[in-house]
């Protein structure tokens, strides 16, 4: 699955957009990319936009491993923008696994605007274009 990852150090948010087919390898590689990035902090919030994901091939084993991971701090909010019910279910499963370990700041939203509002940040996709003049 193609994906974009942007770490916004000013707002302390990881912006992620995914499209195509979501697989176990995609989830694993995204986690590894964050761990390896020196700009990433566990306290950052995250917005994952899965609006353009058309197929899901993710195992329960991967969701369990993700749920047991400690990449983000307990105070880090993670918002998922989902259109497909199967992804909504995966996010809920992830949230339950994280909740069992005391980390439950995970929510699924049907719109990006709702997710951004819950995070309390400014969406870089909605900022006015800068002008020189």
Image (tube, rainbow, N blue to C red):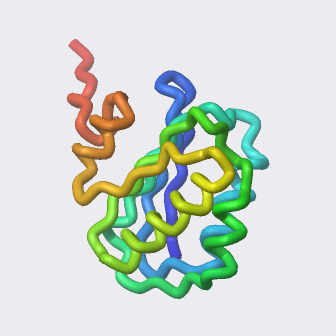
- Label count reads 0
As drawn, 81 above or below 25:
above
33 or 57, which lies in front? 57
Pinpoint residue 116: horizontal percent, then vertical percent: 31, 39
Residue 18 image point, x, y percent = 45, 65
- 5 shown above or below 121: below
| Residue at point 66%, 64% (across, down) | 66
> Could you tell me which quadrant the C terminus lies in?
top left
- Say whether residue 34 is left or right of residue 126: right
- Does residue 1 sit above or below 43 in this rendering? below
Left or right: 14 as drawn, with respect to 35: left
The structure residue drawn at horizontal position 56% and vertical position 36%, both measured from the top left corner, is 76
Q: Measuring from the top left, give residue 132's x and y in whole percent.
A: 26, 17
Q: Residue placed farthest to the top in the image?
A: 133
Identify the residue at image location x=71%, y=60%: 68
Give the residue displayed 61% in from the left and 81% down from the top. 60
Q: Position of residue 69 (x, y in %)?
A: 72, 56
């Amino acid at each position: 699955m193609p994906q974009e990852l942007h770490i916004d150090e000013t707002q302390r948010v990881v912006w992620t957009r995914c499209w195509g087919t979501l697989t176990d390898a995609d989830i694993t590689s995204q986690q590894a990319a964050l761990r390896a990035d020196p700009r990433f902090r566990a306290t950052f919030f995250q917005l994952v936009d899965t609006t353009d994901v058309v197929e899901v091939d993710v195992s329960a084993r991967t969701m369990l491993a993700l749920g047991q991971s400690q990449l983000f701090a307990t105070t880090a909010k993670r918002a998922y923008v989902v259109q497909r019910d199967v992804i909504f279910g995966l996010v809920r499963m992830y949230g339950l696994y994280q909740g069992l370990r005391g980390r439950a700041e995970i929510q699924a939203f049907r719109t990006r605007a709702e997710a951004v509002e819950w995070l309390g940040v400014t969406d870089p996709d909605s900022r006015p274009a800068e002008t020189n003049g």
